[in-house]
Amino acid sequence: MSFEYNKINAKCMWCKRTKNPHPDFLKETIPTKIFKTKKGRMIELCFSCFEQEKKSFDDDVFKEKLDHKYETMKLLNL
Ligand SMILES: [Zn+2]
């Protein structure tokens, strides 16, 4: 599982963070990774949001969850 470090314009689509939360890397952007959802969306997540989503789910359920959360956020205009 490789996250991209100091990516330009990195932004977690769940928590909306753009800055690296680690105090030693405050000038860097947040490490993120792009995940493809079941419906083919590209969702960019930081490591902590990924860890929360991934808990005890297999890959297929994980991808479905990304779609579900994305659609809920759209509905709520988040
Ligand atoms: Zn996040």
Image: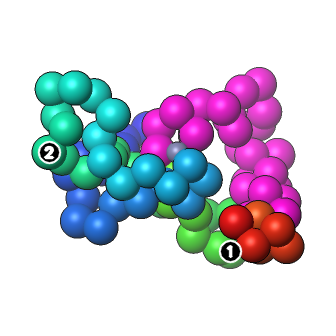
Q: Residue 5: horizontal and vertical position, in percent? A: 24, 47
Could you tell me the amino acid type at mark 2? Lys
Give the residue at x 74% y 46%. 62
Q: Which residue is mark 2?
A: 27
Question: Badge 2: how crowded within 10 Å, few (<14), some, or many (20+)?
Answer: few
Which quarter of the picture shows residue 66?
Answer: bottom right
Residue 2 forms part of the magenta stretch: no
**Of residues 71 and 26, which is closer to you in this image?**
26
Q: Which residue is mark 1?
A: 40
Q: Does the image show residue 29?
A: yes
Between disc 1 and disc 2, the foreground one is 2
Which quarter of the picture shows residue 74?
Answer: bottom right
**Of residues 20 and 36, which is closer to you in this image?**
20
| Mark before the other along the chain sequence, 1 or 2 | 2
Q: Residue 20: horizontal and vertical position, in percent? A: 29, 41
Q: Residue 4: horizontal and vertical position, in percent? A: 30, 50
Which quarter of the picture shows residue 78?
Answer: bottom right
Residue 55 forms part of the magenta stretch: yes
Span of residues in magenta: 46-72
